[in-house]
Image: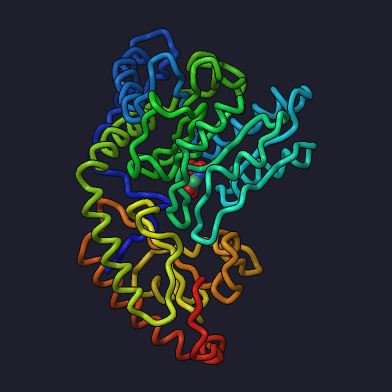
Amino acid sequence: MRVYLDNNATTIVDPQVKTVMDPFFCQYYGNPNSLHAFASDTHIDLNRSLEKIYAGINAPKEDSVVVTSCATESNNWVLKSIYFDYILTGRKNHIIISEVEHPSIIATARFLESLGTKVTYLPINSEGLIEAHTIRDFITDKTALVSIMWANNETGAIFPIEEIAEICQEKGVLFHTDAVQAIGKVPVNMQELKVDYLTFSAHKFHGPKGIGALYMRKGKELKPLLHGGEHMGGLRSGTLNVPGIVGMGKAMELAVDSLMFDMPDVKALRDHLEDELLKINDTFVVTPREKRTHNTMLISFRGIEGEAMLWDLNKAGIGASTGSACASEDLESNPVMEAIGAEADLAHTAIRFSLSRFTTKEEVDYTIGVVHEAVKRLRGISSSYAYTPKDHVSEL
Ligand code: PLP
């Protein structure tokens, strides 16, 4: 059996999305900016797809939703444009991000730091959550931007975006949220939220890879990051990815429906998996369930290296994630586990299971059996678990 439980990394393209994209590869392949019928053949579908994207986040018509190649581009765009407009010009010198942002924010912030920007890395608490009021302590009259993700990719922790946005507005500071892990998991309503910029990416909600977007509130438009043949109101260059936009539109429509219709089932499956895995001794989950996205669980099995568990899972056909930098030569611990201050031996044991509306009960039951067996096997050969004192069953 093959079981995919790594949906926070990417998702299967919904077959309905694939169907609507298909004609735009070999039939309607014109460049929308050309001056002939091959171009205009694409216009109706492009416009309809953009309307679906606006509708999915309830964005007012006058605001901009600019299509990008991915969330990494959208996140880079926000931070670098703010640098050019506010920091390089000397008007401001400071940005605030959380210490558990995606690398596309953290690495960009570090780069800007190397150019002289002051960066505050807002801490999370022991439950992996951000307390909105703490932002107040860090905002100064030199703060140009606050950028805090909506939902964390590792733990699923949902951050208090509404409150943070209110604080930023009150203090006159621009606010960006990386909503990559929020679309299809929490309702997004740009008519109500006081967010200036919002990032998302189609492949996280059953759309195609290579297409994302950046929402910008009217009057807060950023200078383009890419120049040369600007389109989308002059905000971005590069030939439009027509199949991608059509796919993202359909995927957004389905994600909004799914929030209503599939969320209870996905949550029930995630809770079942979690309940059964927590029956194993010395096992811990970060962030209370009600404060997490309904599909995600970051779980630690004391005494078992995350990579060793992944190996056993992979052999049994199950795809999950450790969230650590497996590609590096040093096996780094999970960054969120480190940020919450987990003991060193637990920080290396985290495994992330992330489900989707395509996950079945049969797959979850199979996974439960495989994990129980893997824990028995791996703890049997784990020197660190063997030496853990019996009464050492601490909280994280
Ligand atoms: N932001 C978050 C929270 C993510 O989880 C990811 C992908 O894992 C990204 C940004 C980057 O997305 P993309 O692959 O579209 O660049």
> Looking at the image, is 229 positioned above or below residue 142?
above
User: Camera-side residue: 259 or 318?
Assistant: 259
Q: Quadrant of residue 2?
A: bottom left
Q: How many marks?
A: 0
Q: Quadrant of residue 108?
A: top right
User: Camera-side residue: 188 or 104?
Assistant: 188
268 relative position to 212: left or right: left
> Looking at the image, is 374 positioned above or below residue 192?
below
Confirm whether residue 25 shows in the render.
no
Q: Residue at x 41, y 50 (%)?
A: 10
Confirm whether residue 48 shows in the render.
yes
Quadrant housing the N terminus:
bottom left
Residue 82 in picture, x, y percent from top left: 66, 28
Residue 267 in picture, x, y percent from top left: 27, 56
Residue 97 in picture, x, y percent from top left: 61, 42
Q: Residue at x 33, y 33 (%)?
A: 247
Q: Residue at x 54, y 19 (%)?
A: 235
Residue 358 in picture, x, y percent from top left: 25, 53
Q: Quadrant of residue 25?
A: top left
Q: Residue at x 75, y 39 (%)?
A: 118
- What colouring does the structure picture have? rainbow
